[in-house]
Image (spheres, rainbow, N blue to C red):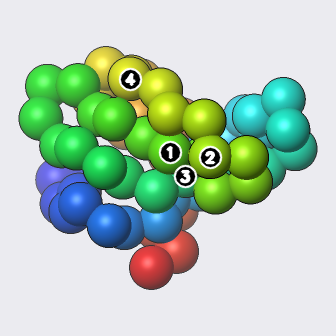
């Protein structure tokens, strides 16, 4: 089981339209609130989608 914490930077398999693969975790739970490191856009994703598309935890 991977432990996610608020403030971690994660790398996902698919890139955001701005070109960045890195996201900052703002909220953890059944849904995640993620902020794109490249452009600052915030999105909500289901925990299952984040775990499935996770490539690695950077920080």
Which mark identifies residue 44? 4
Earlier along the polypeptide chain: callout 3 or callout 4? Answer: 3
The location of residue 33, given as percent across then percent down, is: 34, 35
Earlier along the polypeptide chain: callout 1 or callout 2? Answer: 1
Distance from the alpha carbon under mark 1 to that under mark 2: 6 Å
Question: Label 3 belongs to which residue?
Answer: 23
Vertically, is 31 above or below 35?
A: above
The image quadrant that residue 48 belongs to is: top left
Vertically, is 26 above or below 9?
A: above
The location of residue 27, given as percent across then percent down, is: 22, 44
Distance from the alpha carbon under mark 2 to that under mark 4: 13 Å
Residue 19: in sight, yes or no?
yes
Question: Label 1 belongs to which residue?
Answer: 35
Label 2 near label 1: C-beta < 8 Å? yes
Residue 52: in sight, yes or no?
no
How crowded pointer 2 is (Cα within 10 Å; few <14, some 14-19, many 20+) is rated as: few
Question: Which sits in the foreground, 56 or 29?
Answer: 29
Vertically, is 12 above or below 9?
A: above
Q: Residue at x 47, y 65 (%)?
A: 9
Earlier along the polypeptide chain: callout 4 or callout 1? Answer: 1
Question: Label 2 belongs to which residue?
Answer: 40
Q: Residue at x 31, y 20 (%)?
A: 46
């Amino acid at each position: 089981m991977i432990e996610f914490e608020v403030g971690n930077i994660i790398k996902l398999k698919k890139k955001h339209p701005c070109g960045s693969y890195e996201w900052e975790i703002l909220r953890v739970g059944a849904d995640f609130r993620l902020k794109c490191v490249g452009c600052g856009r915030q999105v909500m994703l289901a925990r299952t989608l984040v775990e499935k598309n996770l490539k690695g935890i950077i920080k």
